[in-house]
Amino acid sequence: RITVSGQENIPQGAVVFISNHQGNFDIPLMLSTCGRLVGFVSKIEIKKLPIVRSWMEFIHCVFINRSNPREAMMLLLRDSVKTLQEGYSLHISPEGTRSRGGPVARFKYGGFKMAITADVPIVPVMIDGTYHIMEEHHGWIHSGDVAIRYLPPIYPGKLTKEEQSVLHETVRQQIIDAMEESRNPEVEWKERI
C-alpha cells in the first residue's frame, strides 16, 4: 500500500531525484510513482545480468566501478552529467547504504555535484516504510505500508556557492522533516494508490 504526495513538485525536463534509502523496494516504488523514466546509479556488476542490464540501459542508468573509488567518482560525474544534459533524469540515494528504517545517515556530496554541474533541478524524495516489505523479514517479501513524498524542487544555479556547499545537509534535513511529518497521523495525503 503506497501513499504518494507532492508529484506536482516534479518539474518538466531532467531532474536529479535525491532520496533516503530504507530498502530494496525504494527504487521500484519511486520509479512507479514519479511519472517518468528515471535512471539510477548502480554497481557495474549488475551489467552481468542480461535482462536487467538491457532494462537499465533503456532507462539510462549510470554504472559505477567501485574497485577504484577515485576513478569511479570522476567517471560517475562525467557520465551522469552527460545523461542529465541529454534530458534524462537520474535518482541518487546519497546515504550509500540502506538504513532499514533507522536514522537517515549522512548524505554524501557526489550526487549533488552532478546536479550542480549539469544545472538541473534537485527533487528531494522522502521514502518511508520500504524496509517493512523485505528487510524486516530476512529477504522474504511481505506486504507493508509505504509513504513517498516529492518535495519542492531546488534549483542549484540559483544558490550561492556557500548554499551549494551545504546542499547535501539541507536536503537531508528536508527529508528528515518530511518523514517526521508523514508519521503524524493528522497528515492528509493527496493520493493513495
Image (cartoon, rainbow, N blue to C red):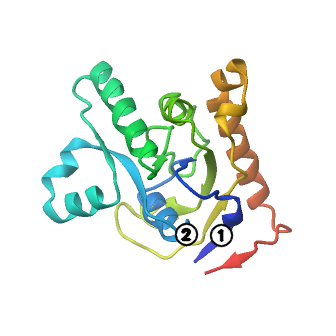
Q: Is residue 167 above or below residue 191?
A: above
Is 158 on the left or on the right of 51, as rendered?
right
The kind of secondary structure element at disc 1 is strand
Q: Residue at x 26, y 31 (%)?
A: 66
Q: Residue at x 13, y 52 (%)?
A: 48
- How many residues crowd around disc 2 within 10 Å: few (fewer than 14), some, or many (20 or more)? some
Could you say which is closer to the camera, residue 136 or residue 98? 98
Is 123 on the left or on the right of 74, as rendered?
right
Cβ atoms under marks 2 and 1 closer than 8 Å = yes
Residue of label 1: 4
- How many residues crowd around disc 1 within 10 Å: few (fewer than 14), some, or many (20 or more)? many
Of the residues shown, which amino acid type is indicated by label 2? Thr
Is 73 on the left or on the right of 124, as rendered?
left
Q: Is residue 170 above or below residue 48?
A: above
Residue of label 2: 33
* Image quadrant occupied by the C terminus: bottom right
Quadrant for residue 139, please give it: bottom left
